Amino acid sequence: AKLAAEAAIPFLKGTISRDRMEKTYVRDWNAAFGMRLRAGRSLQAMFGKPALTRILLDGMRPFPRAVKTLIGLTHGKSF
């Protein structure tokens, strides 16, 4: 909702066009969520295969920081 409001305010004030508002919203949305979705899709593809899942989990066990980083890629930061 925050991204939509931030894009809509200048439009409602009449300082930008609807087209500019929509482009701004899409740009901001992709910046906020695009990487998370790509990371989530990639992880899901890897962990969707049982043999690869086992290899990845066993291989990452000694690297808890790496696991935390992967989780962070899919969860992002709070606004």
Image (cartoon, rainbow, N blue to C red):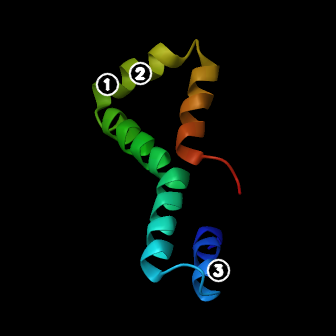
Q: Amino acid at mark 1?
A: Leu
**In the rendered view, would you say 67 is above or below 4?**
above
Image mark for residue 52: 1
Mark 1 and mark 3: Cα distance apart in space:
47 Å
Tell me what residue is drawn at x 64 percent, y 21 percent: 65
Q: Amino acid at mark 3?
A: Ile
Q: Nearer the viewer, residue 68 or 50?
A: 68
**Quadrant of the rendered image containing residue 64:** top right
Helix, strand or loop at mark 1: helix
Earlier sequence position, callout 1 versus callout 3? 3
Tell me what residue is drawn at x 57 percent, y 82 percent: 11
**In the rendered view, would you say 17 is above or below 28?**
below
Helix, strand or loop at mark 2: helix
Residue lying at the far right in this picture: please name it: 79
Q: Label 3: which residue?
A: 9
Asked if the residue at tag 3 contacts the one at tag 1, i.e. Cβ–Cβ closer than 8 Å, the answer is no
Image mark for residue 21: none
Earlier sequence position, callout 3 versus callout 2? 3
User: Which quadrant, please, contains the C terminus?
Assistant: bottom right
Residue 45 x/y as whole percent: 31, 38
Residue 38 x/y as whole percent: 40, 44
Asked if the residue at tag 1 contacts the one at tag 2, i.e. Cβ–Cβ closer than 8 Å, the answer is yes
Bin the neighbour count of mark 1 within 10 Å (Cα to Cα): few under 14, some 14-19, many 20 and up. few
Q: Label 2: which residue?
A: 56
**In the rendered view, would you say 56 is above or below 27?**
above
Tell me what residue is drawn at x 60 percent, y 81 percent: 15
Mark 3 and mark 2: Cα distance apart in space:
46 Å
Mark 2 and mark 1: Cα distance apart in space:
6 Å
Bin the neighbour count of mark 3 within 10 Å (Cα to Cα): few under 14, some 14-19, many 20 and up. few
